[in-house]
Image: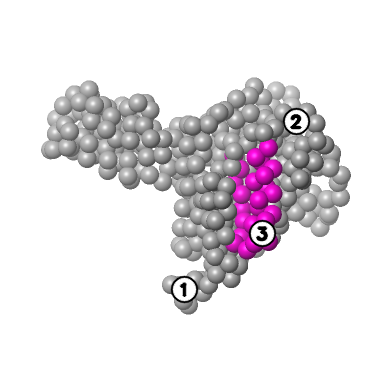
Amino acid sequence: MTKEDILKALSNVQEPDLGKDLVTLNMVKDIEIEGNYVSFTVVLTTPACPLKDMIKNACINAVQILVNKAAVVKVNFTSNTTTRRQDNGQVLPQVRNIIAVVSGKGGVGKSTVAANLALALHAGGAKVGLMDADIYGPSVPIMFGVRGERPMMTEVDGKGLIVPLERYGIKLLSIGLLVDEKSAIVWRGPMVSNAVRQFVTDVMWGELDYLVIDMPPGTGDIHLTLMQTVPVTGVVVVTTPQDVALADAKKGIAMFGQAQLKVPIIGIIENMSYFTPAELPDSRYYIFGKEGGKRLAEEYDIPFLGQIPLVQSIREGGDQGIPVMVSDDLISKHAFEEFAAATARSISMRNANMSATETAVIVDEVGLVSKVGE
């Protein structure tokens, strides 16, 4: 066996999402051959790749069928998270992908989804940060059990930077960590926009595969400010199945469909999809309607990222500062793991097939806001 034989065989193994073979995509590295033993490394597009086992089995079969049926094949994996940022690198220079988690209305569990998405991506091996941009209603301090804690400051090149807290392997920052939680944030729009900019420019986020941003509900100042400040990779839209929530989710989709924003929708996640009692684990009760998020995704031709059940442990975990992704609830964890895997896949395909991410160029903000509201 030669390296050329191995490469020729692996040129028949396709990366399922990108639709090209591993050799063409330059994903095969470090081929070593010793007798009947073969080892090589496949470089994945994300640490959270859900298709590792499929790729591994396809590689082993290709070598054994096309090269040597007696070959003992060891497939190693590493990752080089893809990014399609196109900017000057002055803002979040070491962050490869920025995910904005949005909803058209409050009360659909957006913060819960954002928190557990970040944890599920981290569980897949990615370096992840979570920024709470919901200035008026910050939830991250409660959900991660860091109420009352304060981030430290450091100085880099003469500039003071906030050092995010770390919990469960996630870098965290929220306005709730900087002000008394009993105080109301009574700020006009420009003050809120400045706070969001500072969370991006004056925080030492470091090297991240994904920065998940928990956005406030609706379509307003903070959304526009963020899109102007950083090159957002894409948006995850959170909804629940009922028609009222779906109607508001459509407004969020319409906002990011504006040509000026240039931000693709990564997909739609349906939260509180069904209720399963602990004593009846095989039963599903569709309290808020059935598959409304899936129909919405089909209507707009947007990826559907999955369904999150209405489970008591998810609510309890958020209230107790122990998110369900770090709990013992295997059913809920599996739902979020599948959601994170679908999100990582959608981002990889977005980076491979779409134009580079840029910051939004909004010449007439008033005009844009009026268009968004139409």
The answer to whether residue 159 is visible is: yes
Callout 1, which amino acid? Answer: Ser
Residue at x 75% of width, y 30% of height: 362
Q: Which mark is residue 362?
A: 2
Q: Secondary structure at mark 3?
A: helix
- Marks 2 and 1: in contact by CB < 8 Å? no
Q: Residues within 10 Å of mark 2 (few under 14, many from 20)?
A: some
Callout 2, which amino acid? Answer: Ile
Residue at x 76% of width, y 45% of height: 374
Q: Secondary structure at mark 2?
A: loop
| In magenta segment, residue 238 | yes
**3 vs 1, front mark:** 3
Callout 3, which amino acid? Answer: Ala
Magenta residue span: 234-258
Q: Is residue 188 left or right of residue 218?
A: right
Q: Which mark is residue 148?
A: none
Distance from disc 3 to disc 2, alpha carbons, whole Å, reads: 28 Å
Tell me the residue that label 3 is attached to: 245
Closer to the camera, 176 or 188? 188
Q: Secondary structure at mark 1?
A: loop
Q: Residues within 10 Å of mark 3 (few under 14, many from 20)?
A: many
Q: How is the image coloured?
A: one colour
Nearer-N-terminus badge (3/2): 3
Residue at x 67% of width, y 56% of height: 247
Tell me the residue that label 1 is attached to: 283
Nearer-N-terminus badge (3/1): 3
Question: Percent from the top left, x then y, of residue 118?
Answer: 56, 47
Distance from disc 3 to disc 1, alpha carbons, whole Å, reads: 24 Å
